[in-house]
Image (cartoon, rainbow, N blue to C red):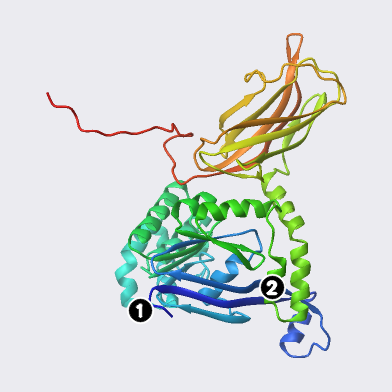
Amino acid sequence: MDKDIAIKVTDLTKVYKLYNKNSDRLKDALGLLKEDRCTEHIALNHVNLEIKRGETIGIIGTNGSGKSTILKIITGVLSPTSGNVEVDGHISALLELGAGFNMEYNGIDNIYLNGMMIGFSEEEIDKRLDAILEFADIGDYVYQPVKTYSSGMFVRLAFAVAINIDPEILIVDEALSVGDVFFQAKCYHKFEEFKQQGKTILFVSHDLSTISRYCDRAVLLNQGVILGEGAPKKMIDIYKQVLVGQYPLPTSDVKSLLEDEDIRAAASKKIEEEKKAAEKESKADDTNPDVLEYGNSGAKITEFYATDAKGLRTNSVVKGTEFTIHMKVKFLKDIAGPIFAYTFKNIMGIEITGTNSMVEKAFLEPVKAGDEKDITFTQRMLLQGGEYLVSFGVTGFEQDDFVVYHRLYDALNITVVSDKNTVGYFDMESTVCVTDSKKD
C-alpha cells in the first residue's frame, strides 16, 4: 500500500443471512439446515475506497446504506464476506460508545479496561488518565460503578476514553454530538485539534452541516454501493436527490458487479424498490407524524414541502441559497380573503421567522368552496445551520373576527446546511473590510 494512504478498501462485500427463526440460524451454524431457509441481504457491494493520510472523510447515505457496516469492518469489529481492508496507523473508534464497558466496574477501572482493549499498556494509560478525567468532567462519579451513571455521564466517559487515546486514525459513527451543549462544544473543539494535527478522520453523520464544514471529501453510499465521492456540497446535493427518488441509480452497474446469481437477483429486486423506499424515508424524516392541527374546517392544507434552488424536493437547504416553501390548500367554504402563512421554529420551540400572504401583499382575493390553490414562498436561507420546524396556516377575517381555517404546527423538518455560522439566529451577510488608518 502506498505510504500516503492510511486506509485502503478493495472490492469489499458484506452479505448478511436473514433467518425467519433463531433455530434456523443455529442449525445453519452447525451445518444441519437441510434446505434454504434464509435470505441474503447485501450490506456492502464491491466497495473500493482510498483515504489519504491527513484527510477528513465523511460518509453519508440513507438508513441501511452500509455506512456503519463499512466502519465496523475497517475497525475489525466485523469480518467481510469478501474483499480486503488495509489500515496503516493506530485507530481509535467511536462506534457504539461504551461498548466493552463493564457495568459493575467504576469509571477508573473501565478507563484501563478500554485502553488495554484498544492496545495500550497500563503505563501508557497512566500518562493519559488526567486528560481523560478532565475531558469527561464527571467529578467523583468516576469512582462509582458505571451502572449508577446517568446516560449523559456514561457517554461523556466513553467519549473521553476514545478521544484521548491520541490515535493516528479517528473513526466516528454518529457520536460527535453527545452530552449537553457545553460538552458538544468540547467534542468539536477536539475534532478541530485532530484536523490541525494532520490526523486521518473518517466519520459517518446525518448532520449535513458537520459534513459540509469539516470534511475534505464526502462519500455517498446507497444500498451498499458508492454512488459518488468528491466535494461535500456536491455529494450532499446528490444525496438530497436520492432521498426523494430523483437520482438515477446505477442498476445495471450493480448487477454487473455481482457474480452470484441469487445475490444478483436479490440486489436487482432491492434496487427496483429503492425509489419508493427512499421517497418513503424522506417523507418519514420530513414530516411530523404527531403534528398538532386545528381549525374550523373552512379550508384544509392537503400538502406541504420544500424545494431547493434547483427545484428539487428536499428537507435540507444550504445556507445562502434560494429555497421555496410549498402549500396546497383545498377550500371547503366560500372565504372572502384567505391568508396563507408559514413559520420557522428552532427545536426549542422558539419562533425565529415567518411570513404570510397578507404581509407580503401577494393574494387578497376571495375563493369559492371547492377551489384549490398552490402557494409558494421563495426566499434566501439566512438562518444558521441546524434543525428547524415549519408550521403552516390558513386564516382570515370574517367581519372583524380573526378566524383559523386550518393550522399545522411543527409539521415539516428543515435542516440548514452551513459551513459558516455567525452569532444568533440568522446571518447579517456582512461585508468586512480592514484598511490601514489614515495618519494626520
Query: Which quadrant of the rendered structure holds the N terminus?
Result: bottom left
Mark 2 neighbour density, 10 Å: few (under 14) some (14–19) many (20 or more): many
Reply above or below: 390 against 10: above
Between the C-alphas of marks 2 and 1, the distance is 38 Å
Residue 98's x, y, as percent? 51, 66
Q: Which amino acid does label 1 sit on?
A: Ser
- Residue behind mark 2: 42
> Is 332 in front, or is 241?
241
Does dot 2 land on a helix, a strand or a loop?
strand
Q: Residue 274: which quarter of the image? A: bottom right
Reply above or below: 78 against 193: below
- Residue behind mark 1: 121
Residue 245's x, y, as percent? 71, 53
**392 sits to left or right of 414:** right
The residue at 46%/69% (across/down) is 51
On the question of residue 125 being in view, the answer is: yes
> Is 111 in front, or is 344?
344
Mark 1 neighbour density, 10 Å: few (under 14) some (14–19) many (20 or more): few
